[in-house]
Image: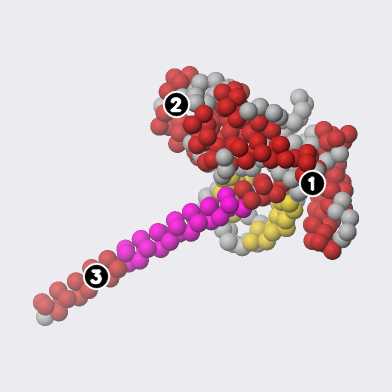
Amino acid sequence: MKIYIANIALFDIYLAYEHIVQEHIVQERIVQEEQRKYQQGRTIIMNLERNIAHNLEDTAFHITTIPNSSFYIHYHTFYEIYYFAAGDADYLVEGKEYHLTPNSLILLSPNMFHGVRVNSDVPYIRYAVHFDPGILPPERRNMLISSFPGNQKNSPREAFYEHTEDYQLEIYLKHLVSSERYQPIISDKQYSTIFLEALLAQISMMSQTLRPTRITYSAPDTITDIIRYLNNHLTESISLDSLSSQFFISKYYMNRAFKKATGTTVMDYLTYKRIVMARQLMLNGDSASAAAQKCGFGDYSSFYRAYRKVMGYSPSKDLQNCLDGPQAK
């Protein structure tokens, strides 16, 4: 009898152990899948950037039903119009969190850290339009992108709009999606550009008559101040120690809170912003070494490594593209 009871106890321990092992395996698979999706997402974004660098906009209509527990944070060098049609999701932009409601709109300028979190399996329906301003006519370009944050002195600092249904933006988006779909069989390739202009004009008019919605959640004031400071002092010498002293915050807490707000660490954020600035200088005619020096990199080798990490290729490729640009056109 005692042996029987002991065997039952051992069997219970074995089952408990098996349960723990299986849970661990499941968690490992979840982590691996999240990492795979992140890497896949970055590859898609980088490929998209290479296309849009040639002034080709990308338009997509998506429906998904798979929730994700955290924000998928990313960034890109082009403009984005994000229109939320339905679902249960939140959006994070540079430390500011917005709860999405049907017919809400987010306008994203280049190089802003942002991402979405889908909260449930309710169908998540949205449109996303990516474009390079070079595709727009020069005489109307400033007006058409004036609604995006940071483009003009009086540009709105917030770029989240709710209750946009009166402006019928979804109709404009549907026309744009249709023009993209039929582009391979239409001889004139300007239709999608015309529809994009119409959409941007409608958004510009909307932004002058509809107030942006206040944020649902913002990063702590200190983190917001640090983000602002980094963007205003990209070319200066900055370290975690100097930031810690200036803002009276421990390095450990600062990095943890910063990553929660932006999806990346303080120094990775700074490096990315500097690389974007250096890339623009090179496209405007600066040499790679001159751009590196102007953007706060101590030496060219660290700049080169950072450039490859952020952009996925060496600085010489952008310099060559710049030289080839006029001939390609």
Instruction: Check disc 2 and report the residue beneath it.
Output: 240
Residue 12 appears in the picture as rendered: yes
Determine whether, in the image, residue 151 is placed left or right of residue 256.
right
Query: Does label 3 or label 2 sit earlier along the sequence?
Result: 3
C-alpha span from label 3 to label 1: 58 Å
Instruction: Check disc 3 and report the residue beneath it.
Output: 14
Q: Where is residue 100 in the image (x, y as percent from the top left)?
A: 67, 48
The segment highlighted magenta reads 19-45
Determine whether, in the image, residue 305 is placed left or right of residue 99.
left
Instruction: Check disc 1 and report the residue beneath it.
Output: 164
The image quadrant of residue 79 is top right
Query: Does label 2 or label 1 sit earlier along the sequence?
Result: 1
Say which residue appears at 55% left-offset and 48% top-offset: 71
Query: How busy is the neighbourhood of tag 1: few (under 14 within 10 Å), some, or many (20 plus)?
Result: some
Q: The residue under label 2 is which amino acid type? A: Leu
Which residue is more in the foreground, 231 or 169? 231
Say which residue appears at 76% left-offset and 24% top-offset: 153
Query: How busy is the neighbourhood of tag 2: few (under 14 within 10 Å), some, or many (20 plus)?
Result: some
C-alpha span from label 3 to label 2: 48 Å
Q: Position of residue 179 (x, y in %)?
A: 83, 57
Find out whether residue 43 is within the magenta segment. yes
Query: Does label 3 or label 1 sit earlier along the sequence?
Result: 3
Q: In which quarter of the image is the C terminus?
A: top right
SS label for mark 1: loop
Say which residue appears at 51% left-offset and 21% top-offset: 237
User: Viewer-nearest of labels 2 and 1?
Assistant: 2
Q: The residue under label 3 is which amino acid type? A: Tyr
SS label for mark 3: helix
C-alpha span from label 2 to label 1: 42 Å
Q: Looking at the image, do the residues carrying marks 3 and 2 touch, with CB atoms under 8 Å apart?
A: no
